[in-house]
Amino acid sequence: MRPSGPVLLLVAAALAGCSGGGGTAAPGAPAPATSTAAAAATGSPGAAPSRSPVPGCEFYQAADAQAVLGAELAPAPKFTDNEPGKTDTRFNSCVYWTADGQRYANVGWRRALTPAGAADNRSQFANQRTADAVAVAGLGGDAYWDTPNGQVLVLAGDALLVVSTGVKDKPAAERSRQDTEKLARLVVSHLPA
């Protein structure tokens, strides 16, 4: 059975940051004033890995995106609050783009704020899983590659992560499972408890 309603919201929200328009920092935008965080986000030599300089994206390090994309990054990730006003969950999507604006590494982090939010995250995770989903061992509490949508979903404690990597304007079916799993492992390795 193919999911609908709120489950498709997860897919649409996670992909919202992958479109070319809107957001905090568009690819090709001028770099902000130099700072350690901005230098690390751009992958400048000698810059220490840092948390994102964008509030709401602290869970995602520029070094994670750079390790997967292997290229200079745009100055800051694009941030999207996918469920504004929700009281049980907070779902932020943060996308690092390469400096040329062609490739991205996207992480959606849906944190549970209440027990009902935790239950909803588990339900979303289960309902999104299709018959052709492929289990990903050793990642969070449970994880799988969502084949039709080209993304990895991870249950990490009470949180749900939706992770994807890809090329601008290319279909989900062309996303790299290997790169996406690598990004998911990097992000999960330093999530807050």
Image (cartoon, rainbow, N blue to C red):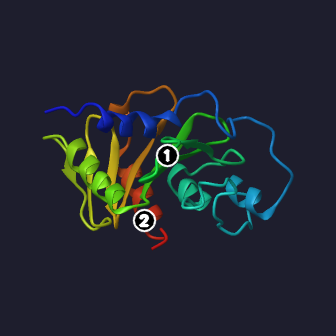
- Quickly name the residue at label 2: 188
CA separation in Å, label 2 and label 1: 13 Å
Which residue lies at the image location 16% right of the left edge and 41% below the top edge?
132
Which residue lies at the image location 61% right of the left edge and 57% below the top edge?
62
Quarter of the image with the N terminus is top left
Q: Residue furthest bottom?
A: 193
* Residue 105 location (% of width, % of height): 51, 46
SS type, badge 1:
strand
Where is 111 relative to 138, above or below?
Answer: above
Q: Quadrant of residue 150?
A: top left
Where is 40 relative to 87, above or below?
Answer: below
From the viewer's perspective, tell me whether residue 59 is left or right of residue 116: right
Tell me the kind of residue under disc 1: Asn
SS type, badge 2:
helix
* Residue 70 location (% of width, % of height): 56, 52
Where is 16 relative to 89, above or below?
Answer: above
* Residue 178 location (% of width, % of height): 35, 51
Tell me the kind of residue under disc 2: Val
Quarter of the image with the C terminus is bottom left
Query: Is the residue marked by circle 1 packed among few (<14), some (14-19), or many (20+) residues within 10 Å?
Result: many
From the viewer's perspective, tell me whether residue 32 is left or right of residue 79: right
- Quickly name the residue at label 1: 106
